[in-house]
Image (tube, rainbow, N blue to C red):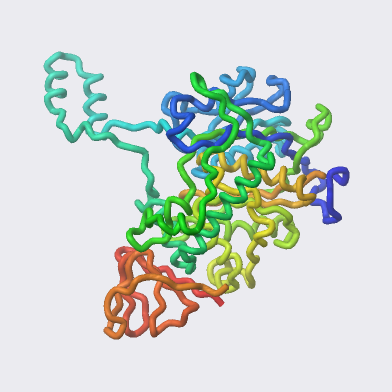
Amino acid sequence: NSQFQTKSKKSLSRPGVKNIVLVEGVRTPFLLSGTTYVSSLLHEGLLNKTALPKDAVDYIIYGTVIQEVKTSNIAREAALGAGFSDKTPSHTVTMACISSNQAMTTGVGLIASGQCDTIVAGGVEFMSDVPIRHSRKMRKTMLSLNKAKTLGQRLSLIGGIRMAHLAPELPAVAEFSTAETMGHSADRLAAAFGVTRLEQDEFALRSHTLAKKAQDAGLLEDVISFKVPGRDIVSKDNGIRPSSMEQLAKLKAAFVKPHGTVTAANSSFLTDGASAVLIMSEEKALAMGYKPKAYLRDFVYVSQDPKDQLLLGPAYGTPKVLQRAGLTMADIDVFEFHEAFAGQIMANLKAMDSDWFAQTYMGRTSKVGAPPMEKFNLWGGSLSLGHPFGATGCRLVTTVAHRLRKEGGQYGLVAACAAGGQVSRDHAVCPSTGTVLWGQESGDLSTDTHTVLMGHVYSTPWFSHRKVFLCYRGRIGADKTLLTGRDRPIRQYRFS
């Protein structure tokens, strides 16, 4: 273990537990959906950068979110398309934006249990050609037509088709349990934590600026060139677009209109892309002559209320994985968080840095602390690099490994939130100002009640500037109590 360590921190190896290592990580360029990948199937392009004999892989696991109906087990199709042995079992997992995290940790479990020594894990998302279904009534009619035995039965069914039956049914963009889009949730979360539009735009600009700098410096070495059938070779991400604060300020709210703070620029964009990692037991890797990039030491998954805490997973998961590893935030050299929305990142950082939040919502005595920005997402993130739902996890882990080696660090931490209020926390070990309240007031503050609009945060004469309130459309009573907003209670956060 010591041959890889670059600092004098403690080792996390445990007696009797296999060391599991990341040997290599690769990905296609992440491209804006609807651009170059528009006519391809990305599973056809799974490549191997290690010269590993393809029959040496014990198992292949892939993550994806929106299933391609012709290849429901994308892992198997990717394996066969890439020339892996047809004797290698493969399966596909789905866990929203942490699908490839789940693929990797499933592989870690197989190695730890002694079932396998060599795993290829990865993820893919192809937003340029999502499956679109017929309406339920049309599907029912078509199935009935297939079973009809006489011409009369068929004509009767066809005669019952109406124009409304022809309306297509697109993949849902909203949470199944709440019927709310993630962007809407992000806007509410940002408002609840007093994250301003300015803060979100500044973070988005930071992401794009750092990504461009890393791309120009050749630091994104996990990106491999990809030949699109019938088109050009693509070799770099095409969503990195540094702008200016003046340009970002011109954009209108994308979800909570007209006064929301989440815009197209401070949100991650729909992306096509694929990623893969080679995970092995350390013993096997060294026997085959590989020099591991990182140890994969620990991970946790947590879930929260998908209604009001949909994107707060990183704040909940960080203390748990650190506690399991016996580490503190100060021990971590590299942080890589999935940037679904700038407001989501800033809200999580504020939650992590709040004693009140830790005590009230997590049952902890004190805050875990926010990651120092000089260690945080220094090569850009999902806001700039792109976010193929099923592929981002592998990018995060590979980036941590590369940054640790480049920066001479030892411990790295990955976090990614996901739909359903879930989060993955992976822990990799390298081998070698005040709250600003905003909003527009509705009604007279001197009257008995005060209307609060969805996504707005208010400072009223009754409450100090260190409290923020949020609801769909509710009322704050004259007795300073919070009344129910629509069908849900108002969520309230206070910061000490």
Instruction: In this rendered view, identify the residue nearer to me: 294 or 304.
Output: 294
> Residue drawn at (34%, 71%), measured in percent from left and top?
440
Quarter the C terminus occupies: bottom right
Residue 431 lies in quadrant: top right
The spot of residue 310 in percent (x, y) is 47, 56
> Residue drawn at (44%, 55%), measured in percent from left and top?
306
Name the side, left or right, on which 286 lies relative to 192.
right
The spot of residue 478 in percent (x, y) is 32, 84
The spot of residue 374 in percent (x, y) is 68, 59
- Residue 14 in view in this figure: yes
Is 87 drawn above or below residue 294 in the view shown?
Answer: above
Name the side, left or right, on which 181 lies relative to 392.
left
- Residue 300 in view in this figure: no
> Residue drawn at (54%, 61%), measured in percent from left and top?
346
Residue 147 lies in quadrant: top left
Quarter the N terminus occupies: top right
> Residue drawn at (56%, 49%), measured in percent from left and top?
208
Name the side, left or right, on which 293 lies relative to 148.
right
Residue 51 lies in quadrant: top right
Is 315 drawn above or below residue 172 in the view shown?
Answer: below
Counting every numbered tag in the picture gives 0
The spot of residue 348 in percent (x, y) is 55, 61
Name the side, left or right, on which 447 lies relative to 458.
left
Is 266 drawn above or below residue 199 in the view shown?
Answer: above
